Image (cartoon, grey):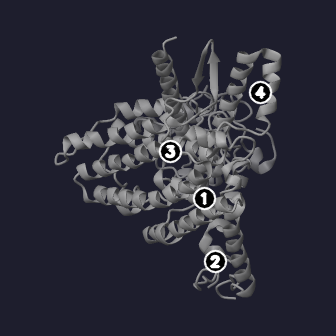
Amino acid sequence: MKLTNRAKQIDNSPMTVAERLYIPAIATGLGITIKHFFKKKATINYPEEQRPFSSIFRGLHVLKRDEQGRERCTACGLCAVACPAEAISMTAAERKPGEEKLYREEKYAAVYEINMLRCIFCGLCEEACPKAAIFLQPDKIAPAFVDREQVIFGKDRLVEKMDDRATTGIQKYTGVKS
Amino acid sequence: MDPLIVNALIILSIFGITLLIATYSTWAERKVAGFIQDRLGPNRAGWGGLMQPLADAGKMFFKEDFIPAHANKWLFIFGPSLAMLTACMASAVIPFGDSFIIGENIVLVQAIEVNIGILYVFGVVSLGVYGLMIGGWASNNKFSLLGAVRAASQNISYELAMGLSIIAIILMSGSLSLRTIVEGQHGGNWNILYQPLGFIIFLTCAFAECNRTPFDLPECETELIGGYHTEYSSMKLGFYLFAEYINMFASSAVTACLFFGGFNYPGMDAVQNELIKSLGESTGHNIATGIGIAVMFAKILFGIFFFMWVRWTLPRFRYDQLMNLGWKGLIPAAILNVILTGAGILLEMRWLSWVAVLIVIGIAVLQASISQKKELRAQRA
């Protein structure tokens, strides 16, 4: 099967005088390399310059709040079922009277943990979620870690902060804000 | 001033400049490699990576200095020392500039002016291969020894052609002193204009003598696990690698002296006269000498750049190709060049060695036009 047009038939006939002198070939080669010498460099100086993320990049997860700041997650467990890497675990709890400001539904996740070592960032949890609660952010990557304890992200690191709302959310699917 | 002190100062400064240029050659090598491969090269240590050589040297010193159990300890230490010593000695006879007039004295910009300059360079450079040979042998490792044997046979083979190509230069200048050879090229009479064949042979041999690509067979990772310095670590390895860069500097300087007129540049007489007229006899002469030194160093630096440029362009030769090129190609060509140059001097036609070049080009063009080489075509058309 022919995959590309780059395959060339090798010619094994004896070298001509010009080829045996090597000099024309060397001069051609030197010409090619000096052209590259002055070309624009492909390097990106990483900490100073950063390559922009793709708009559909799947990065660090976020547990969204709604427009009134209530947690959207209702601990249905569909994300944990959808997860092919079995990275998500949660414990559900019932909303007590007086907690209506905190949780949108009558049931909420008391514990919600994602193991970032298991997670493969496939985005199936985001697709499975019926409440538009979990999203993979297109502008944040999971931070580096030095300890296995740091790998399990709990609600303290997953739920979005009110003063620092995530850029992604339900509008990704509906166009409606929040 | 005491001539001894003046000489000591000149020797020290030339030694220092040699080491400085060799140090920054390691940085330049990586920069050139990067630029040729569309990268940036080292740029983290200092501005543009300029502190990189210091960082590398620091790293080298702090590495474990390992001597293998069955190695011959003293020879193992002697090898890199000898390589470094001979490399540093080579630049002693090179005239970097004309002369400075200080008071009554005329001081030559040269460590030692001897009438056998080029022979001295040759002797010292040939000693350099002993450093490789001793190091490879003392390692008590068959791959190191193979690398050392390769180095020795390669250097001996290419020294012949190199010596023969220099004979043509010596014939033309009538002296072995590098200063006389350089002064003989005054007024744009650069030897490369009369010795194109000799220049190509000399350059090729210089690459082989410095163990630079495409002739870096003594150090070959795929075949020899590294070469003659496989067993070396720490600054001993550093000395071997550093000696290569000093050799590059020395051979660029010798090339500049032999073929590119050393510190001569077109229109230097006019510049000197103008400077003497406006600034007085000694100041004008000194400034003109300074310009000459700058020109010399520009030539040397371009030579070093050329070494690197070729290194990042060409792949390594196979060993039989290397030997074929040396013995069957360069040596006969060099002998032909000597004969043609001799005949040229006898018949007062100094351009005679161009004839050989033109004949070879003619044959190549003729053959290319007669036998059409098959075009490379796609494998399954």
For marks 1 and 3 on the same chain, the one whose residue lies earlier in the sequence: 3
The C terminus of chain B lies in quadrant: bottom right
Q: Say which residue label 1 marks.
A: B198
Left or right of A161, for residue B237? left
Q: Residues within 10 Å of mark 2 (few under 14, many from 20)?
A: some
The chain letter for the residue carrying disc 1 is: B
Q: Give residue B357's position: percent from left, percent from top.
A: 68, 67
- Same chain for labels 2 and 1? Say yes or no: no
In the displayed orientation, state which residue is furthest to the left.
B70
Q: Nearer the viewer, mark 2 or mark 1?
A: 1
Chain containing the residue with disc 3: B
Front in this rendered view, residue A176 or B297: B297
Chain letter of disc 4?
A: B
Residue at point 63% right, 11% down? B103
Which of the chains bears the disc numbered 2? A
In this rendering, the answer to whether A12 lies above or below A128 is below
State the mark number for residue B118. Answer: 3
Residue at label 2? A17
Q: What's the distance in space between the residues labelled 2 and 4, CA to CA? A: 47 Å
Tell me the SS state at disc 4. Answer: helix
Return the disc, 1 or 4, that comes first in the chain's sequence: 1
> Which residue matches tag 4?
B272
Q: CA distance from mark 2 to mark 1?
A: 19 Å
Crowd rating for badge 1 (residues with CA inside 10 Å; few <14, some 14–19, many 20+): many
